[in-house]
Image: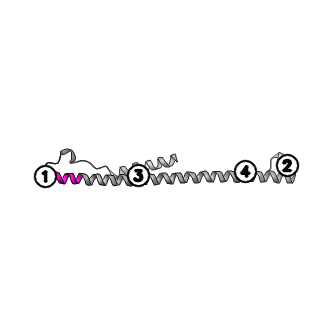
Amino acid sequence: METRSPGLNNMKPQSLQLVLEEQVLALQQQMAENQAASWRKLKNSQEAQQRQATLVRKLQAKVLQYRSWCQELEKRLEATGGPIPQRWENVEEPNLDELLVRLEEEQQRCESLA
């Protein structure tokens, strides 16, 4: 079974060799371009993940700082004998599991954009 197209059947071996070499070079170039594009996408995705991880660490540090600051204010209020306002009591802390799910969703969204 012949795999060549009808036009290639009528070509001289040297001409056929040149056509095949050109096709091989074109495919190699296309593969190199595709690989470069894939590496760029991967690099961009990794950079986005690093930026997001840095942001998460900064936000976690701010939350800890804020909690510490609130605890210090509460201690000062208790030390002076002042009542702690009701709105500060019974405040629900954000559900860590929900926050992690939202973070993962954002990471996936960022990856799909890169």
Bounds of the magenta segment: 70-80
Residue annotated with mark 4: 26
3D distance between C-alphas at marks 4 and 1? 81 Å
Front disc: 1 or 2: 1
Between circles 4 and 3, the one closer to the viewer is: 3
Examine the structure image and report whether residue 82 is included in the region drawn in magenta.
no
Q: Which amino acid does label 1 sit on?
A: Thr
Q: Mark 1 points at which residue?
A: 80
Q: Position of residue 53 (x, y in %)?
A: 43, 54
- Sequence-first disc among 3 and 2: 2
Q: Do the residues labelled 1 and 2 touch (CB within 8 Å)?
A: no
Circle 2 sits in a helix, a strand or a loop, which is it?
Answer: helix
Query: Could you say where residue 41 lies in the image, as x and y percent from the top left?
Result: 56, 51
Whether tag 4 and tag 3 are in contact, CB under 8 A, the answer is no
Main SS, magenta region, reads helix
Q: Are marks 3 and 2 in contact (CB under 8 Å)?
A: no
For this view, does 37 lie left or right of residue 64? right
Q: Mark 4 or mark 1: which comes first in sequence?
A: 4
**Residue drawn at 47 percent across, 53 percent down:** 49
* Residue nearest the viewer, comparing 14 with 10: 14
- Closer to the chain start, of discs 4 and 2, is 2
Name the amino acid type tagged 3. Answer: Leu
Q: Is mark 1 on a helix, strand or loop?
A: loop
Element class at badge 4: helix
Q: Verify CB contact (< 8 Å) between mark 1 and mark 3.
A: no
- Is 79 magenta? The answer is yes
Which residue bears the numbered disc 3? 55
On the question of residue 2 being in view, the answer is: no
Find disc 2 in the rendering and name its residue. Answer: 9
- Residue 68: quarter of image: bottom left
